[in-house]
Image (tube, helix red, strand yellow):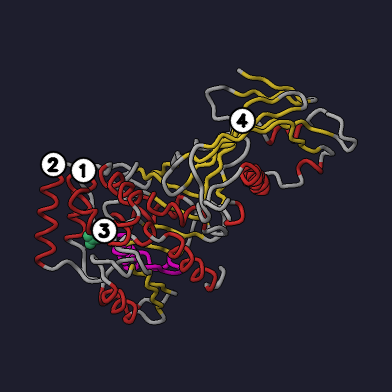
Amino acid sequence: MLRFRTGSLATTINPDDPVNGLPSVEVTVYPYECDAYGHMNQAAYLLLFERARWDALARGPGQDVFRRHGVWPAVRRATVDYQAPAFPGDVLRVDSEVQKVGGSSLEMRQRATRIRDDALVAELQILFVMIDEAGNSTPMPPEVAAVFGARPTARPGEMARHDVGDVTLAVDVRGDGPALLLVHGFPLDHSMWAHQVATLARWRRIAPDLRGAGASDAPAGGYSMASYADDLARLLDRFHVERAVVVGLSMGGYVAFEMLRRHRQRFMGLVLIDSRADADGPAQRQARDEMIEVARSRGAAAVAERLVPRLLGRSTQQTQPNIVEQVMTMVARTPVAGLVGALSAMRDRPDSTALLPGIDVPTLVVVGAEDEVTPPATARAMASAIPSATLTTIAGAGHLAPLEAPTAVTRVIAEFLEALPRP
Ligand code: MLT
């Protein structure tokens, strides 16, 4: 046990608990923070970590927490350890861990991890001493100490788990504001939305793993568009969310159509990315059955080998090997029961074409210019059948546009969200 005493307050920190007085935040690397080769220098890192601390305070006790108590945290020592290069536009998650708390000092470690590939780019070890207006070291006021005390925060990368009936779903939930429900495609998981979840501030981003995907339960049966849609409606109930903007990628779009059929009142808006409304024809149904056989007999890695080259655009395959690897890994870790379940659910899904003219919520259709699974012509036809839908084509991206061209996709979603009437 580590105990620290500040004035009248004694806080106990169990070493087994995450000692994390500040929430994790995401910061974007700006061009002016990098040198001529795109790498960040020491001064830039110090500023970036500082920005993250103030952002974290703004989300918690307020940035005036020190002034309110007549103290100021003066930096006495700071060391940056470089681990990997960082470039303009990279979104970094900064986790801050309080390591030691003395009567008037505080030692903290901050870690910056790139969201896109989970690479640790830098760590900062920093020591603060509380000073008063005259610049003298002063005891830490109890409320300030409490800000940095142990709290039951999720460990970095840990997902919340929510029971939605016969399954428990793993869910990445971040931010406040109107809800944005991000529904992944097949055979993927919530992590495909990393950039959107990290950057669409002012929205409550809810990115679940569907049943059978990622870290959610993967029962042997019970997969259909209806069960996926009902799971998500129950998940919104769990979060007391009445209405959300539903964003679906490919199979996520099929789930969104089923939600429209069954839970129409839950929609504030709809974003369909690399998706389609029509059902499988005989050839696709046969291909689903063959893939089910591959999954059962040879496992998820074999499914990844067959599918991934079709999912990613040629530009991505030529220029972004890290994305190819990320998607291979994501597919290969999908439970076989989930693969088989999703393939049969897609094979048996109803045709949603007749639904399109009746969609009366603001709708955005997005498609990768190099998408061969749901090509631009399909997206164009779908968008023109939905009254008031707008269509955006993303250059250089294939079927997984939010992963392949994250900045461009996030920007069009953000513009769409900005234009929505606020509830
Ligand atoms: C997806 O990305 O969800 C799948 O490619 C959809 C499909 O196979 O129909």
The amino acid beneath tag 3 is Leu
- Quadrant of residue 393 in the image? bottom left
Q: Nearer the viewer, residue 168 or 413?
A: 413
Question: What kind of element bears circle 1?
Answer: helix
Upstream in sequence: badge 4 or badge 3: 4
- Quadrant of residue 157 in the image? top left
Residue 311: numbered disc = 3
Crowd around label 1: few <14 · some 14–19 · many ≥20 (10 Å): some
Q: Which circle, 3 or 2, is nearer the viewer?
A: 3
The amino acid beneath tag 2 is Arg
Mark 2 sits on what residue?
298
Question: What kind of element bears circle 3?
Answer: helix
In x, y percent, where is residue 160?
A: 45, 42
**Residue 166 in sight from this viewpoint:** no
* Magenta residues (range): 250-273
In x, y percent, where is residue 253?
A: 32, 64
Q: Nearer the viewer, residue 257 or 67?
A: 67
Alpha-carbon span between mark 1 and mark 3: 15 Å
Alpha-carbon span between mark 2 and mark 4: 46 Å
Mark 4 sits on what residue?
150
Badge 2 vs badge 1, beta-carbon distance below 8 Å: yes
Q: Which circle, 1 or 4, is nearer the viewer?
A: 1
